[in-house]
Image (spheres, rainbow, N blue to C red):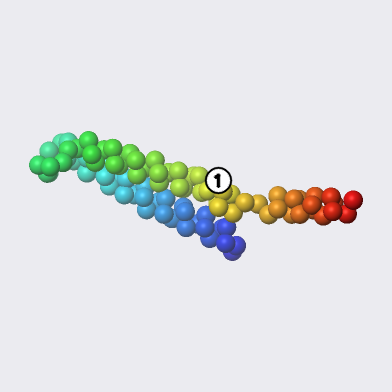
């Protein structure tokens, strides 16, 4: 496997872990709202917002890994084309 593929795999695995944390936060938020447990210094809204945020970030890392990999590792064709154009201009 190439470095880009390993990086994409790592992003997707991290995305799954973050998404599962988000699901956990959402479940805790609903249980808190239903009164199964209480923390005097917290509110169920915190858990719901944190769960949604984790879920969105996790889904983005799972589904958007390709765009992040393209950003981190640009295609080599562009670099080769620039090198060829520079050499063509130097030959003239």
The residue carrying mark 1 is: 67
Along the line of sight, the residue nearer the viewer: 31 or 9 = 9
Q: Which residue is rendered at x = 15% and y = 36% of the image?
A: 34
Residue at the far right in the pictured view:
92
Along the line of sight, the residue nearer the viewer: 78 or 11 = 78
Q: Where does the image place residue 73, in percent across and percent down from the top left? A: 59, 54
Q: Where does the image place residue 30, in percent across and percent down from the top left? A: 21, 38
- Residue 32 is left or right of residue 2, and the answer is left
- Residue 38 is left or right of residue 46, and the answer is left
Along the line of sight, the residue nearer the viewer: 40 or 79 = 79
Q: Secondary structure at mark 1?
A: helix
- Residue 43 is left or right of residue 18, and the answer is left
Residue at the far left in the pictured view:
40
Q: Is residue 11 above or below residue 41?
A: below
Along the line of sight, the residue nearer the viewer: 38 or 83 = 83
Placement of the N terminus among the 4 image quadrants: bottom right
Q: Where does the image place residue 43, in percent across and percent down from the top left? A: 17, 38
What is the count of numbered marks? 1
Q: Which residue is rendered at x = 26% and y = 44% of the image?
A: 25
Q: Which residue is rendered at x = 28% and y = 37% of the image?
A: 49
For the question of whether residue 83 can be seen, the reply is yes
Q: Where does the image place residue 64, in percent across and percent down from the top left? A: 50, 44
For the question of whether residue 38 can be seen, the reply is no
Q: How many residues crowd around disc 1 within 10 Å: few (fewer than 14), some, or many (20 or more)?
A: few
Q: Which residue is rendered at x = 76% and y = 54% of the image?
A: 83
């Amino acid at each position: 496997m190439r470095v880009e593929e390993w990086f994409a795999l790592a992003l997707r695995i991290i995305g799954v872990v973050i998404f599962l944390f988000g699901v956990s936060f959402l479940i805790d938020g609903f249980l808190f709202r239903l009164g199964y447990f209480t923390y005097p210094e917290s509110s169920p809204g915190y858990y719901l917002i944190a769960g949604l945020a984790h879920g969105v970030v996790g889904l983005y890392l799972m589904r958007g890994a390709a765009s992040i990999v393209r950003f981190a590792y640009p295609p080599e064709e562009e670099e080769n084309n620039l090198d060829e154009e520079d050499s063509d201009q130097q030959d003239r």
